Amino acid sequence: MQETLSIKGYWWLPDLEENKQPGILTFSQEDGAVLDVVGVLDTSGFTPFKEPAIILGITQQGKPITLYKCIHLQMNYPSLGLGFGGEKYFAHFVFEGVHFSSPEKIMFNCLYAHYDDLDVWVGEHGFSINTEFTNDGIISKVSYQTPPEQLFKLSDELSVGVAFSSFGPVTSSVQTSAEISQRANLVVKSNSQDFLFDKLFAKLNAFSNLLLVAAQRMPIPTIVFGYSQENGQNHGEGRVHYPKINIYYQLIENVQNQKKKIPQELLFTFDDLIDEQIISWFSSFEEYKTVIQLYKLLFYTNRSFIEHKFLSIAQSLETLHSILFDNQYLPKDQFKAQKKIVLEAVPPDLVEWVEMALGSSNYKRFALKISELLDYKKDILCELIDDMDLFSRRIKDTRNEFVHHNKQKKTFRKNELPSAIAVMIMVFEVYLLGIIGFPDEKVLELLEPKIKTHLTGWKHLRSKSK
């Protein structure tokens, strides 16, 4: 995923395999996957640009390639039969190691992905290192056994979990070093038949969002791969080999060099979670998807001004309230009855105006929503916020000033915004940790270092879990 590619090969459309054209596929996080073809893939003549869902290829080394969700960027059609012409395409996904002839056939049995911060989050390894000091020197004994995968059954169809890959050691005639390395992967796996890629990929992204909450920054995929039952190769005597399918796609932001974290810097570790919490995350993800995506925007490093960050977390809190709390002052039938009484009492020429004014009057105002969120978790938030009513009003006034461009009395000054945003994020995380399944006392334990860091101005680290 983070590596760059430059692959020479022949390329064609699935229904025009006889028209194979040479070209080069390049991939980088800066530019994405771009196919530069010598010649024209579609031989139907001077037609408007077509957007082929699939382009197939074979590399110089004989490896199959599928380009998925392609966009036609450029065409140089051969004039009067002279020259080869040329085309350029952008592909959203590159599948290296397989041919899929149509989007409906892009199916996988399992997907694996390694992310920055994942090894720290999982915190498990298979190494045993024993060092002895003797009169003759140091004796070091290193043994390694790959840890077993940990899978959690979401349904009869799918399981998710963590699996481990290991590499080495390499032996040589002159041995000067020996290295074994291990990598943790998030895995989404079918319990039976292959599944559409888009469905499995959505589950993988949902899993990575749990890592985002824990690591408090964007999870950057470094390696993504999968296996497909349909891609099995028969080696005779009942032996079937399933080649590894490497997957490449461009991230929204370019990959950033991130300082490695230690477990104590994480909001929680994989070890803090129990089976039911991981399963619950997936079962509730669709309901909370909107607020999680709004929260996620806060962790893009190059895409947001401070005003945008404020509005994102303010919207996250408002949407969260709409899911968790009653959003209306009165029951619907009671409000409808009272509205009818009011409309019957006003002069006929004012009925339309009054009805319009009453249209959304039963829905709670923004400041009240924030106030209810704060009050419900006041036992956790009391150390962080002195005056919860005042804080709610200041959030409301700042939001209104940014949205409506009207000066408000209690708007946060620009130098106060970073602190206000930090507190609002922690309010959101109190609820988010509850959604994951942590009880209030555990939520306070997990957030305490972050709260103390905010209050004291110097960094606090949490105790290592369990």
Image: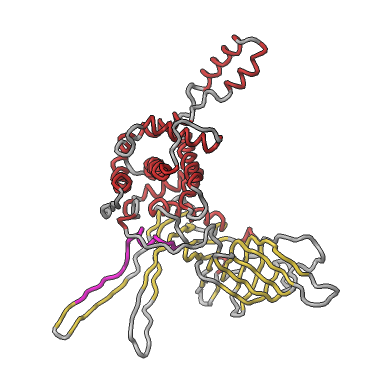
Task: Please tell me whether residue 125 belongs to the stretch shown in magenta.
Answer: yes
Nearer to me, 232 or 316: 316
Q: Nearer the viewer, residue 206 or 455?
A: 455
Residue 451 visible within the image: yes
Where does the image place residue 265, in percent across and percent down from the top left? 32, 55
Image spot of residue 34 (x, y percent): 63, 67
- Residue 133 lies left or right of residue 352; in this view the side is left
Q: Position of residue 194 (x, y in %)?
A: 54, 59
Q: Is residue 112 visible?
A: no
Seen in the picture, residue 222 relative to 332 is either above or below; the reply is below
Q: How is the image coloured?
A: secondary structure
Residue at the image point whose x is 56% and y is 68% from the top: 28
Q: Give the answer, above or below, for where 235 lies relative to 91.
A: below
Q: Is residue 176 magenta?
A: no
Q: Residue furthest right?
A: 80
Residue that sits furthest to the bottom in the current view: 173
Q: Is residue 219 above or below residue 369?
A: below
**What is the number of callouts on the image?**
0
Residue 107 drawn at (x, y percent): 57, 60
Please state the extent of the stretch shown in magenta in the rendering: 112-131
Residue at 34%, 50% (x, y): give it. 274
Q: Residue at x 35, y 77 (%)?
A: 179
Q: Nearer the viewer, residue 420 or 65?
A: 420
Residue 89 in the figure: left or right of residue 148: right
